[in-house]
Image (cartoon, rainbow, N blue to C red):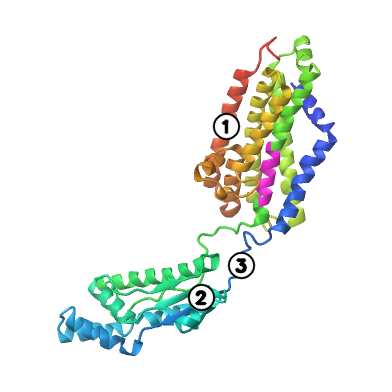
Amino acid sequence: MLSFIKKDLLLFWRDRKEIITILALPILLIIVLNFAFAGLFGNKDELSMDLEVAVVNHDDQTKSMERLKEKLDVDASLGEEEALAIVEQARHIEPIELLMTYLNSEGISEWVRVYTLKEDEAISRVEKGELDGIIVIPEGFSADSLYAAFLGEAPSSSMKFKMEKETNESKALYNIVNGFIEQLNYQFALQKTGNVTEGDVILPNGGFEEIGSGEGFTLTEYMTIAMAALFALILTGTIATKTGVEIREQVFKRIILTNSRPIYFLIGKMVSTFFLTWLQMMFVFTFSHLILKVFPDRSISFWLGTVGNISILSLALAGLSAVFTAVLLRMKNIDAANAIFMLVVIFCGVVAGNFAPNEMFPEWLQRIGEWTPNGLFMVSLSEWAQFEELSSMFMPSLSLVGFFLLCTIIGLAFYPKRGETK
């Protein structure tokens, strides 16, 4: 058995050009792509945003309480005493003042610059690209929103957010404003049910929050994982093409003539694929980390989990090599078989996001990519890099082991018996 494994390792070792390509090219691509697309994913320590928004206020806040009192008397037909109690309570929660306080709070002011402008000037500056959006407060907004909040009715006027075109900045601004409104509505609902004391409406906290205790995920980390998985897949296809060389040189028939068990040939391919892909990925991760500091300040448990992910992917690719080898031994046209294997490798690399993030593809194609061996590896290791939770590795690892078993069974089923090779 060891002689078969040694044969496959030596066969690959003699092709020095292939070795240099498999080891050096992924490192080179990681370095080039890292500098070419620096900042695409962002660094949590360098993340910055410069948002500019204009507030156009058509409302007369000095008359808002008078208008609210009038609406309570006329529209709601409330008694004088009850209406005055609501107006007094509303003085503590004027929506426009809360909005301006929120936008100028410490957490938000670091990201957003607020200008109070006339509508014509604000529209002109948005069209010139000087502003990211406009918040328009219609006339009577304060009284209408407070009246609706205290009486549980739909407001007759609403705040509007306008933008020239949808960009990352305008979407961020919209989310900030929308988050404020949702939190304010929630506080109004609590006020109405009596779950908070009078006037005790909590202003939403400004700022950007990191959910959970996960690590940041950078472009360099993504590219390292993607390139390692891609070239491990390419290496599996390359090892399969070496079988074509052995077929041309009658190696398989000579093995039969020596009265050795033919199955050792297949097992040798699987074992050599496991070792070669494992070493290749370890090389990529090690040198990427040494050159670019891909995973700085990580614990020993992180690296053990990474090695575990690499080992499981290598096992899955060993199963895939069994299928490639069995198919190649049964096909008459070796070149056609090699072309098919490369197409399979390229397809898996594309849909799994090894060449570029697969979010650009339809959702059904993304789902296929997530079930390829390299796709499962990328999902597992990406989540492990961020959260270091064993639960994030369990299902992808189980799927990869299942993939290995399935491919092994298929490879054994198609593996030719004595006299059946083409």
Query: Which residues, given as a range, are shown in magenta?
Result: 223-233
SS assignment at label 2: helix
Q: Is residue 306 left or right of residue 203?
A: right
SS assignment at label 3: loop
Mark 2 or mark 1: which is in front? 2
Q: Which residue is mark 3?
A: 47
Q: Amino acid at mark 3?
A: Leu
- Label 3 and label 1: CA atoms lie apart by 39 Å
Q: Amino acid at mark 1?
A: Phe
Residue under the image location 29 percent in, 70 percent down: 189
Residue 228 is one of the magenta-drawn residues:
yes
Residue under the image location 26 percent in, 85 percent down: 67
Mark 3 or mark 1: which is in front? 3
Q: Are marks 3 and 2 in contact (CB under 8 Å)?
A: no
User: Along the polypeptide, which appears first: circle 3 or circle 2?
Assistant: 3
User: Along the polypeptide, which appears first: circle 2 or circle 1?
Assistant: 2
- Label 2 and label 1: CA atoms lie apart by 48 Å
SS assignment at label 1: helix
Q: Amino acid at mark 2?
A: Ile
Specify whether residue 289 is in view: no
Q: Which residue is mark 1?
A: 403
Residue 108 is labelled as 2
- Circle 1 Cα neighbour tier, 10 Å, few/some/many (<14 / 14–19 / ≥20): many
Q: Is residue 382 left or right of residue 231?
A: left
